[in-house]
Amino acid sequence: MSLSILVRFLFLAFFVVFVDGQCLDDQQKLLLELRSEFKFNSSISQGLEHWNGTGDCCEWKRVKCEDSGHVISLLLNSEGISGRIGESSALFRLTYLSSLDLSSNDFTTTEIPNQFHHLPNLAILDLSDSGFKGPIPSTLANLTQLVELYLPSNFLTGSIPSFHNCKNLESIKLSDNNLMGSLSHLHFQGLTNLSRLDLSHNSLNGTIPNHLFSFPSINYLYLSNNQFSGQIEEISIIEFPLLRPDANANENESDYYFANFLFLANNRLTGVIPTSICSISRLMVLDLSFNNLIGSIPPCLLQESYYLKVLNLRGNNFIGVIPDTFNWECGLKTFDVSDNNLGGKIPKSLANCVELAVMNVGNNNFDDSFPCMALPESLKVLVLRSNRFHGELRCGKSWPDLQILDISSNHFSGTLDSLNFSSWRGMMLQSQAHLRRSPSDILNASYLYRDEVTIIVKNVEVRLVKIWPDFTCIDLSSNHFEKEIPDAIGSLTSLYLLNLSHNSLTHAIPRSLGALKELGSLDLSSNKLTGRIPDELTKLDFLSFLNLSYNHLTGLIPTSSHFQTFSADSFEGNAGLSGFPLNGSFNPHPPGPSPSEDSEPKDEEIEWEYVFAAFGYVVGFGSIAWILLCCRSLRERYFEKIEEVADKIFFERGRRKRHERRVRRREERNAFRRRHHQ
């Protein structure tokens, strides 16, 4: 029995040694040559720093070999590599290489080498975020085994080469460059396996070729932030292949794998949304924002909202109403129709979207009361700003995860205590709703889509391109709210921005606002607030913007090192306020009476003193200049003294610089010797 076990062990050891194999000598030499070519930061390197010529090179970090000992994979991302890759680099002699990752390095002085065609087995090439400039080499289109090509976030220019010879390509990402030109039907012709194409954030123009929508495997098409033009209805979206509901899909697999994503935002597309877009099966993200689209929103688009998670139609010229056709199985998480010309009322069927996290209908012409019954309790972001909403905020619902509420510039009235502030746990520090949030929880596929919202921060319009979990905001400004500010707002301890300006609020500023320790911006201006400024506000250490102007506040402005940083603009328009900075001094007493009429002669006397002082300076300098001009011996001694002082100054400065250079060279030599001995 023991003999049998021994035989099996020896066979296994033999199998591991000879099947796994060792790195071939020529492969090891090429790796060491490549290491010597690269300039890299040894303090952050995880691979190159450990290639020391000892041991099996197939066991070196970030190196993988095939069974015969040829190197097939190099993962050299984030190695701190800088400089350039030479055309004769050892890299291009690793001909068995199938996967190469050089992303997140620093090749800012070089173009992408033109020698990648010497790697005929290359299937994955990742050069993203590495500072490459210049055109995309046409030789990349000769890599017939290429499956994935990633060149985003560089400084690439010129046009996109045709990849019609790369029949195996499944994923192409060229986003965030400076690529220009138009796309023809030849660019990606015949790529039947292409499932992901990202050309976003470039300067591509012309019309979008129809064949981009007809690839049999495409399910991720990202063309946003370019200059594409033309009628959107001319695009054969109905040919978008997409997986049909009856596809042979495993029910346990993620919906995201089988979903479809269509990004056409930030272009120059015109026309109306074609109803054929409703035929796209399993459409999860549709982003048509910031184009020149017109017409109305197709009702079928909302009826087929079971798979649809993101619908972004922001920044177009849509008219009409939002169709009241949200499916009872609505799966929307983001609904953004802001910056259009939509009107009417918020449809009641929106309440069917029980997972809705972001609702933005700002900057339209909606004429409705507060849409309480249409708003699901799942909301994290609610923006109704700049419409014609009116009436009181009577709503018994609570939004435990709410982060951003912006209903500014409407015609709301009544009191603020009708809002259930104490239930907004998402704005409270250490609450369960606050602790469980993460940057990606608004949409699980956040690496594919990020929600955006525009708000007013410190009187400046700010576009948040990513909604962080710690950012919280309440903007109720420019309405007709009255009576007191509720004490309950003081329980929203993670609140960053509070804007209640341009209303008719009365009574004193509640002391409970002093509990908002995270508050960075507070605007209570243009109301009818009375009483003193609470001393508790001086304890808000993160407060960088304060506006209490144009109220009826009285008494002394609280004195603290933090409050002294605010300008007089923060307190103007309050006749009863006194103290710094309104008085221009730290005098804690109210300003004295205005100067009497007999003060005018004194003002004239002060002005004459300035005149006499200036005259004295002129006479003094003129006398010295006259003496130096007329007395030659004195002039010579004067300039000799000046030269002597100048020589001493510059000699001493030069001596110090020479000494510093010697010390620096000595330290560099010592450091080199220590590294050499190690």
Image (cartoon, helix red, strand yellow):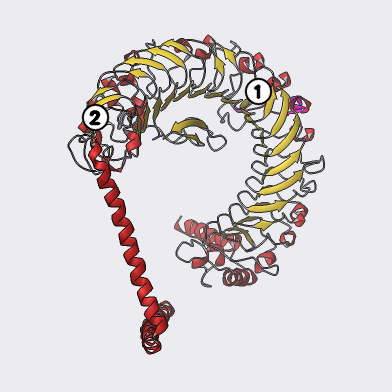
Q: Which region is colored magenta?
A: 235-250
Q: Residues within 10 Å of mark 2 (few under 14, many from 20)?
A: many
Residue 363 lies in the magenta stretch? no
> Label 2's element?
loop
Q: Is residue 539 visible?
A: no
Q: Position of residue 310 (x, y in %)?
A: 57, 26
| Type of amino acid at the residue the image marks with label 2 | Ile
Residue 243 lies in the magenta stretch? yes
Q: Kindly indicate the quadrant of the structure image that contains residue 212.
A: top right
Residue at point 57%, 36% (across, down): 448
Q: Position of residue 38 (x, y in %)?
A: 58, 68
Q: Kindly indicate the quadrant of the structure image that contains residue 230.
A: top right
Q: Nearer the viewer, residue 481 or 405?
A: 481
The relative height of residue 478 versus residue 169 in the rendered view (above or below) is above
Q: Residues within 10 Å of mark 1 (few under 14, many from 20)?
A: many
Q: Residue furthest bottom?
A: 633
Disc ID at residue 533: 2
The relative height of residue 82 versus residue 177 in the rendered view (above or below) is below
Q: Is residue 300 left or right of residue 415?
A: right
Q: Position of residue 26 (x, y in %)?
A: 65, 71
Q: Nearer the viewer, mark 1 or mark 2?
A: 2
Disc ID at residue 621: none
Helix, strand or loop: magenta stretch: loop
- Alpha-carbon span between mark 1 and mark 2: 45 Å
Task: Say which label, 1 or 2, has the lower sequence index.
Answer: 1
Q: Position of residue 255 (x, y in %)?
A: 58, 28
**Total marks in image:** 2
Mark 1 = which residue?
Answer: 317
The quadrant of the rendering that contains the C terminus is bottom left
| Type of amino acid at the residue the image marks with label 1 | Asn
Q: Nearer the viewer, residue 163 or 467?
A: 467
